[in-house]
Image (tube, grey):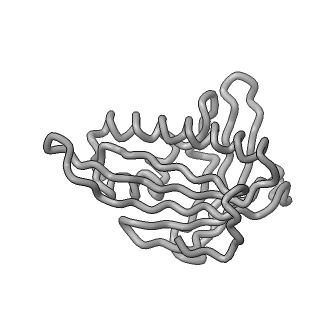
Amino acid sequence: MDDELPDDGVDFLHMVRDLPSAPAAIYSAWLDLSRITSWWGAEGFVVPPDRIVANAHEGGNYQACMVHTATGDEMWWAGEYRVLEPPHRLEVTMQWRQADGTPAGPVRLISMALQPLPDLDGEALTRMTFRAGPFIGDRELRAHETGWGESFSRLAGYLARHGGRS
């Protein structure tokens, strides 16, 4: 995946998940606001539909907020859609924000690529390759790995519940 950020192999998060759906269904789950609110966020968090806005085209912006279900604490972030190549690739920037929109961290790049795999017992199967960063230190990288891992488990559950439909 082409990006403009340095990659020394240490400060970037790399994750690969095989998901039981066609690339178009997974791509749609990433971009369709009615779908993304069903899976985006770590365990214990939700992204309420009224807390996400997006102008999903290259150069368009988005803003979202995860809400901790037990405490009500909010985590805001925003970014720009840099590359949209449905149904195989997307790239966005991501930056933590204060509730008023003030930047609260560095700009990060998130890349996601989808590769169809041979069907599994007649069902579509897709390899999702995810990359995010750069991160400052191992602790921050591991925290994001945990959060994204939980999000991707929720994504797999969402896709299973909806039969991988796009």
The residue that appears at 21% across and 53% down in the rendered structure is 118
Residue with the most extreme left position: 122
Q: Nearer the viewer, residue 84 or 46?
A: 84
Quarter holding residue 63: bottom right
Above or below, 51 relative to 67: below
The residue that appears at 72% across and 53% down in the rendered structure is 77
Residue with the most extreme front position: 9
Find residue 3 and report its horizontal and vertical position in percent.
Answer: 61, 74
Q: Nearer the viewer, residue 38 or 119?
A: 119
Left or right of residue 16, residue 127 in this image: left
Left or right of residue 10, residue 162 in this image: left
Q: Nearer the viewer, residue 154 or 77?
A: 154
Left or right of residue 13, residue 118 in this image: left
Residue with the most extreme top position: 70
Quarter holding residue 7: bottom right
The residue that appears at 47% across and 49% down in the rendered structure is 16
Left or right of residue 16, residue 102 in this image: right
Find residue 94 and report its horizontal and vertical position in percent.
Answer: 68, 60
Q: How many marks?
A: 0
Find residue 31 and report its horizontal and vertical position in percent.
Answer: 47, 58
Above or below, 156 relative to 56: above
Q: Is residue 107 visible?
A: yes
Find residue 35 and report its horizontal and vertical position in percent.
Answer: 44, 47
Q: Is residue 47 visible?
A: no
The residue that appears at 44% across and 46% down in the rendered structure is 17
